[in-house]
């Protein structure tokens, strides 16, 4: 049986991949900016909680963006 990937993880990773062409610091800021501007507060909260639970499967740029969102 396959576990379902949380949508916040999938979407955040997709954003990170799309912005991965930028220098690392700029990319993390862009990911955080996108999430901060366009995501519903409940989605941001779930992403932050997921990151607190170990961040398994999160792209490194998402982890850096989470630090900026806090």
Image: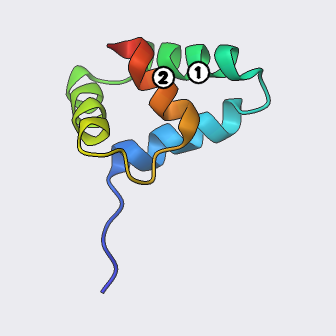
Mark identifier at residue 65: 2
Q: Does residue 36 sit above or below 42 in this rendering?
A: above
Whole-percent x, y for residue 26 in the image: 68, 14
Q: Disc 1, disc 2: CB below 8 Å? A: yes
- The first of marks 1 and 2 along the sequence is 1
| Image quarter (top left, top right, bottom left or bottom right) of the C terminus | top left
Residue 53, x across and y down, in percent: 23, 44
| Cα distance in 3D space between marks 1 and 2 | 5 Å
- Label 2's element? helix
Residue 46's x, y, as percent? 23, 36
Left or right: residue 32 compared with residue 42: right
Q: Is residue 33 left or right of residue 51?
A: right
Instruction: Please identify the quadrant where the N terminus is shown.
Output: bottom left
Left or right for 25, reference 9:
right
Q: Is residue 18 above or below residue 65?
A: below
Tell me the residue at 38%/14% (across/down).
69
Vertically, is 23 above or below 9? above
Quadrant of the image occupied by residue 40: top left
Dot 1: what SS? helix
Query: Which picture quadrant has residue 25?
Result: top right
Graded by Cα atoms within 10 Å as few (under 14), some (14 to 19) or many (20 or more), the crowding at tag 1 reads many
Mark 1, residue position: 28
**Picture coordinates of residue 58, whole percent (x, y):** 46, 45
């Amino acid at each position: 049986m396959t576990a379902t990937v949380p949508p916040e993880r999938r979407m955040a990773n997709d954003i990170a991949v799309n912005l991965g062409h930028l220098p690392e610091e700029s990319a993390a800021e862009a990911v955080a900016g996108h999430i901060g501007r366009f995501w519903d507060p409940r989605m941001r909260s779930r992403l932050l909680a997921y990151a607190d639970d170990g961040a398994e499967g999160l792209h490194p740029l998402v982890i850096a963006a989470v630090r900026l969102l806090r």
